[in-house]
Amino acid sequence: MRTAIYPGSFDPVHLGHLDLIMRAEKLVDQLTVAVLQNPTKGCSFSVHERMEMLQSVTQHLPHVKVTSFEGLLVDFAKKQKANFIIRGIRAFSDFEYEFQMALVNRKLASDLETIFLMPKEKYSAVSSKLIREIGFFGGDLSEFCPKELLPKISAHLKNRKP
Ligand code: PNS
């Protein structure tokens, strides 16, 4: 059984994340999308809201489950008996941070492989941070967020400091 974890903040989930989830779930038997619970990071959406949004856009994917985690990713991966960590690389600018994280995770857990996937080019500029900023000013998020979540995300972000 090949199991992978796709960890992240998902604050909020966007079309680039969803594209990656659909690519990753084809490669493994079970994909766990794991939302980071980090009270010090100051996320805009609560863990519960982030999980709920992910659940609603992945409910048609039977091999995908959504959960949350706290603490070290490698510890969570061990508990889940995961073989792989999935991370996305949108552009060269993501590479340094992702490379560093992958190597540190490998030092902590040598049998856990990080797999990098690239989303569709049209999502290479999409990020949760920019979505929060556009949403704050009431901008149109339809190019970036799953259609069914647009009303919820737009209403939540409007006038909320990114
Ligand atoms: O979507 P993000 O915010 O880029 O995701 C970052 C995440 C959640 C993958 C990373 O911060 C993480 O794994 N945090 C858990 C703590 C941990 O294991 N840190 C060491 C990683 S080198």
Image (tube, grey):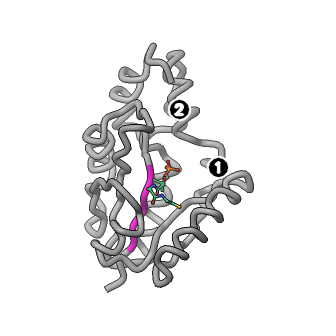
Local packing at callout 1 (Cα closer than 10 Å; few below 14, some 14-19, many 20+) is: some
> At 39% across and 67% down in the image, what residue appears?
5
Q: Which residue is mark 2?
A: 131
- The residue lying toward the viewer, choosing from 73 and 1, is 73
* Image side of residue 86 versus residue 75, left or right: right
Question: Magenta segment, principal secondary structure?
Answer: strand
* Image side of residue 118 versus residue 40, left or right: right
Vertical arrangement, residue 155 with respect to residue 79, above or below: above
Report x, y in % for residue 84. 44, 75
Vertical arrangement, residue 108 with respect to residue 111, above or below: above
Q: Which residue is mark 1?
A: 124
> At 31% across and 42% down in the image, what residue appears?
53
Name which residue type carries label 2: Ile
Give the extent of the magenta segment: 4-8
Q: Quadrant of the N terminus?
A: bottom left
Report x, y in % for residue 80. 28, 72
Distance from the alpha carbon under mark 2 to that under mark 1: 13 Å
Secondary structure under tag 2 reads helix
Whether residue 7 appears in magenta in the rendering, the answer is yes
